[in-house]
Amino acid sequence: MNVQSPPEKLTARDYATDQEVRWCPGCGDYAILKAVQNTLAQLEADPKNTVFVSGIGCAARFPYYMETYGFHTIHGRSPAVATGVKLSNPDLNVWVVGGDGDMLSIGGNHTMHAIRRNVDLQILLLNNQIYGLTKGQYSPTSKIGTKSPSTPLGSIDNPVSASQFALGVGGTFIARSSDILQKHLPEVLKRADAHQGTSFVEIFQNCIVYNDGAFKHFTEKSVQDEMQVHVEHGQPLLFGKDKSKGLVLNKDEQRLEVVTLGENGVTKADIAVHDETNRSMATMLAQMDPPTMPVALGVLYCESAPTYEAAVHAQIDQAREKGEGDLAKLLHRGQTWTVE
Amino acid sequence: MSEAAAIDTAEGQPQEVESAVVRFAGDSGDGIQLTGSQFTMTAAISGNDLATFPDFPAEIRAPAGTTFGVSAFQINFGASNIMTSGDQLDVLVAMNPAALITNLEDVKTGGVVIADSGAFTDRNLKKAGYEENPLENDSLHNYRLVKIDMSRLTVEAVKEFGLSNKEALRSKNMWALGLIYWMYGRTRQASVDWLKSKFANKPEIADANIAALNAGHAFGETAEMPAELGTIQVETAKIEPGTYRTITGAESVALGLLAGSQLADLNISFCSYPITPASSLLHQLARMKEFGVVTFQAEDEIAAAAAALGASYAGSLGITSSSGPGIALKMEVIGLAIGTELPMVIVNSQRAGPSTGMPTKTEQSDLYQAVFGRNADAPMPVISVSTPSDGYVVAIEAIRIATKYMTPVMVLTDGYITNASEPWMIPDPSTHERFDVEFRTDPENFQPFMRDETSLARPWVKPGTPELMHRIGGIERSYDTGHISYDPDNHQKMTDTRAAKINGIANDIPEQEVANGEPGGKLAIVGWGSTYGPIDRAVGNMRDQGYDVSHIHLRYIWPLPRNLGDLLKTYDNVIVAEMNNGQLRTLLRSEHLVPAEGLNKINGKPFLIRELEDAIRAKLEN
């Protein structure tokens, strides 16, 4: 018998394939790919038990660049394919990567049902508020007025908020980060990996070609302190330079408000403390929009709940406890008769 | 009216018949399907060959007494070679005016019509569209009419059990069954046992039903009914020794899928979305958890197919099932299965279309969709189920082909086969030939699209296997490595290879045989799927009369059997009989340049034997 030496610790590079990455130079997807590879290295994820599933779109090229198992499927269907993978083999660690058009437009239905079933997947929604691969049409997350080849006079339909959607359909883990937050993003991804059930991570991603600067009003260095609040469970919702601002809960109006420490007698004790198990608070955080409110990043919501595939296999195990199926007996079940 | 049966009849003698066709018809709430299945079981136990045809409305609880709420169950039983549920009825049991008006035209002249006169109220007559009571105005003089107030007699029979009038009337179907048992000299024991076990928790309901069954039987014995009604002897069949059960198409496909997965040593992931008439397959498999069968009711047809493919990717056998419109939604996923060369089984229980069409009515109109219905050059094997029990071997064969050739396979069945039943000699699964799947585990020279030289199949690798990590997807794949490739020559080569792989399956399936008759001659009737029964019976009858006609029945629709073209060319004439507007005919003409003609029926009902006999006669007497 061969003596197996302990495997060397893998680095981020070990999770990269030999395939040339073909996103546009400067695309936010590069940073997200790097963050995911870093995360897997930090988690010491076993490549053979890791599967990346994607649909169609720029983001959906992701599996080709990951030295794991990968399945690049069809537009919108990746959550459904991934559900089948988990049903078949619950031991696999399955990541689903897609964009806003893939997961909220053509695949919105599958995203909803994967989330509400709580299939143990990490769903990374790379939201750039535009269709990239089809050359720049507006997407279901584009702001009203987005001018694009299909909306030359500006888009007129209301955008959907990915995180509010995920909260609304009963998601058990909803988090947000951004392509440029190279320290924050891996931490969020690690939490997503640890969560049992659907981990829904909305990652704001800049499309340098068709929607450049879509998020700069809260991601640019000059404004990021004032326009981002990084939420942490059990910690006060403070932000701004020197953490001088915070969010308080206006109980009369049931909404969050921005306050400045020291003004009007506000102290740190007045600041709302993030409770990631509180869906109402998570919803209020997800609703915040610049310029009046900062964008909430981090784990907005996390609750423990049974996973779908575990429940499916528990029913099977329960049935098998009463006796393993016997095909010959099954064929004879019910009324039979014998001809001599 | 008088309590005793009033009967208008020509005098007749007690008779012995080779076979008989009985149809029960009533409101969808009358328990007609249960009545039919009980009669079926008793006929089978008595040694009759049989075929049944349940026909029920699309509406779950259609308003009582309406014509669109009529549910019917037909059984043809007798000596062997009962191939169909029968063209014409010997006996119609009509539980109300709507049942009579919608079913009367199928009763043969001189046939027996048993009507529950208690249900022929003014209100029910009006609902059915009768201006006057047909039981009273001699309009049924071409039939032997038996008028019985079954409603009142049932209520009386169950009086002692203290049920409400409404509850008591629920046993009316058993009263009618008892009478028919008496007519055909059948024992009631199997049904009594069944009622006791079905209503084990409600003994008063069991007792009431048994009392009604007995009362119906006793009524036949004691009432002054013409003798011939009580002494109909139906010949028993010469049946091969063995243990039998009745089986529907849904049951046989479900059991075949389970058996096939065991022969392949795979777990099943059955992913489906409810649709008539395919849902019964999901229901069957959902009850097989002790075999490790995973069933998944997806959010839509697309997700069902996608999840099945995901399961196959992960190393289970992914199966999805639907009917025509749902299959259309799955096609993009099926294309992905073809491109990524993963095994998958798609069961299509065809129904009348296009679009929603007639969901509860049968048709064979998805052949084009199965063979051609995808974007691009996307070949896929297609095989069909010919009889209610045939689904067992067809489902096993679908799994064998899917796993050996790493391809999706479509199984075509239809609404008729799904619900119809026939006796089935139960096979011994330990005698089936195994085809265990070998997953690739060896990293030496591994390439995800490197092919087996003979089958042209690529290796199947389970995620979780060390050192074989790889990526596959819908973008064209480089010939060996599977990497994304836009190379023109590679696409040509891959397209050619995908076609060659599927065409090569023709060398791995049996040559086409003649089902009835011989190779060569004046006329071949070619069929596929559920037309097997009526074609075979019609061809048999015509051959008995000296006509030179043979029956060829296809199981394999794509690829076609390798000898089929040569075989068809041995006949002067070829008629393709199918329940669509000529789909197999088009395929045979284009593949084999044979001047096939069509016999096409698209009214939601199976062929009648005489329709086929007429076509044969017309062709051969010209």
Image (spheres, rainbow, N blue to C red):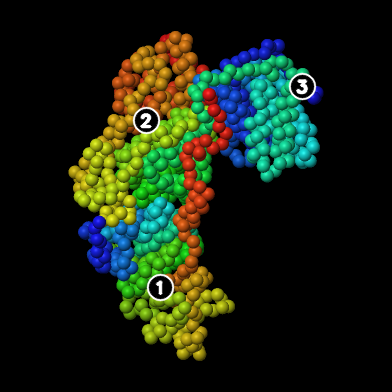
The residue lying at 48 percent from left, 19 percent from top is B537
Please tell me whether residue B239 is drawn above or below residue B202 in the rendered image. Answer: above
Local secondary structure at mark 3: helix
Q: CA distance from mark 1 to mark 2?
A: 58 Å
Q: Amino acid at mark 1?
A: Leu
Provide the residue designation for mark 3. Answer: B222
Q: Looking at the image, can residue B338 be seen? A: no
Q: Chain of mark 1?
A: A
Sort mark 3 into few (<14), some (14-19) or many (20+) by Cα contacts within 10 Å. few
Local secondary structure at mark 1: strand
Q: Amino acid at mark 3?
A: Thr
Badge nearest the viewer, 2 or 3? 3
Q: Amino acid at mark 2?
A: Tyr
Total numbered badges shown on the rendered structure = 3
Provide the residue designation for mark 1. Answer: A297
The residue lying at 50 percent from left, 77 percent from top is A256
The picture places residue A67, in percent across and down from the top left corner, at: 27, 59
The picture places residue B261, in percent across and down from the top left corner, at: 40, 42
The residue lying at 43 percent from left, 39 percent from top is B259
In the image, is B37 to the left or to the right of B479?
right
Q: Farthest front residue?
A: A1
In the image, is A246 to the left or to the right of B149?
left
* Labels 1 and 2 positioned on one and the same chain: no
Q: Looking at the image, can residue B381 be seen? A: yes
Badge nearest the viewer, 1 or 2? 2
Badge nearest the viewer, 1 or 3? 3
Please tell me whether residue B326 is drawn above or below residue B531 in the rendered image. Answer: below
Q: CA distance from mark 2 to mark 3?
A: 55 Å
* Sequence-first tag of 2 and 3: 3
Provide the residue designation for mark 2. Answer: B556
